[in-house]
Amino acid sequence: MTKPPDNDRLVIDGPAGALEALLETPKDEAARGVAVVLHPHPLHGGTMQNKVAHTLARSFVRRGFAALRFNFRGTGASEGTWDEGRGELDDALAAIDWARDRYPGQPLWIAGFSFGAAIAIRAAIEAAPAGLVSVAPAVRRFAEGLETQPSCPWLVVQGDEDELVDINETVEWVNGLEPGPELLVFPGVEHFFHGKLIDLREAVTEFIDRHR
């Protein structure tokens, strides 16, 4: 049985002020990598405590990674105000820089859910991580029209009954990318993966195992 991770509440210097953050690390062992996990839309109740974001973080900790979650600007105790995804990308890049400074030479992954998944895709293009996991990415609003795509191993996960991110739009978008990500569709699953978080964790863990 996996031991519960150690948790450290942190403050990261962000471009619009302090960012409230939480670092989870494997119990009684040194981290073999670090993942930065991005939460869903701040204006619709999204925070770093979101259950899908939490599940993503635990997936990485189970495989020996440290997992950094943080609140985007204007969310929770993070300073600043909502910036339509532009400043939030800068927040993500600041968190990635912090993680790389904290774990120099270790593989860095980026993961995100919904709005956070779209920002994770954009951040991966700039930050060139070792891997990327995008759950129900809100690409039509926040990551459409990218001239390049992440070059790392990349997993997109979505339910086929997602009421907020249309599965057909996601499939069309993925099919237009070359070579594009690996797409995993969960049948009968909606946006927040109610009742399917363990299945999501296992799918992400399996992808990490194949590409770390």
Image: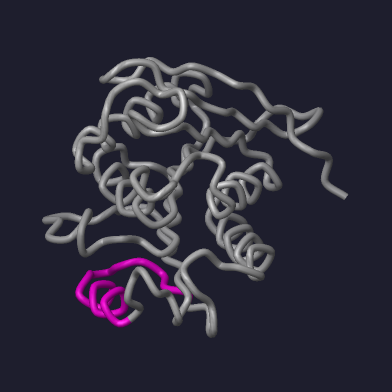
Q: Point out residue 97 in the picture as x, y percentages from the top left corner.
A: 37, 24
Q: Please name the residue shown 36% across and 69% down the image.
A: 164
Quarter of the image for residue 140 reads bottom left
The residue depicted at 73 percent of the width and 28 percent of the height is: 6
Looking at the picture, how far across and down is residue 111, in whole percent?
45, 48
Out of 53 and 36, give the one closest to the viewer: 53
On screen, residue 47 versus residue 44, left or right, reads right
Residue at the front extreme, as displayed: 44
Question: Which residue is more in the foreground, 142 or 122?
Answer: 142
**What coloring was used for the rendering?**
one colour
- Report the number of discs: 0
Judge from the rendering whether residue 199 lies leftward or rightward of residue 52; answer left or right: right
The correct choice, above or below, for 172 with respect to 95 in the image is below
Please provide the residue range marked out in magenta. Answer: 168-184
Q: Residue furthest right?
A: 1
Q: Residue at x 63, y 51 (%)?
A: 59
Reply yes or no: does residue 45 show up in magenta.
no
Work out whether 164 lies above or below 70: below
Answer with left or right where residue 75 lies relative to residue 124: right
Q: Within the image, what quadrant is residue 127 found in?
A: top left
Q: Residue 165 versus residue 57: which sits nearer the camera?
A: 165
**In the shown orientation, is residue 160 left or right of residue 168?**
right
- State the residue at coordinates (39%, 57%): 114
In the image, is residue 171 above or below residue 136? below
Q: Position of residue 120 (x, y in %)?
A: 35, 47
Question: Does 174 appear in magenta?
Answer: yes
Residue 64 percent location from the top left of the image: 68, 40
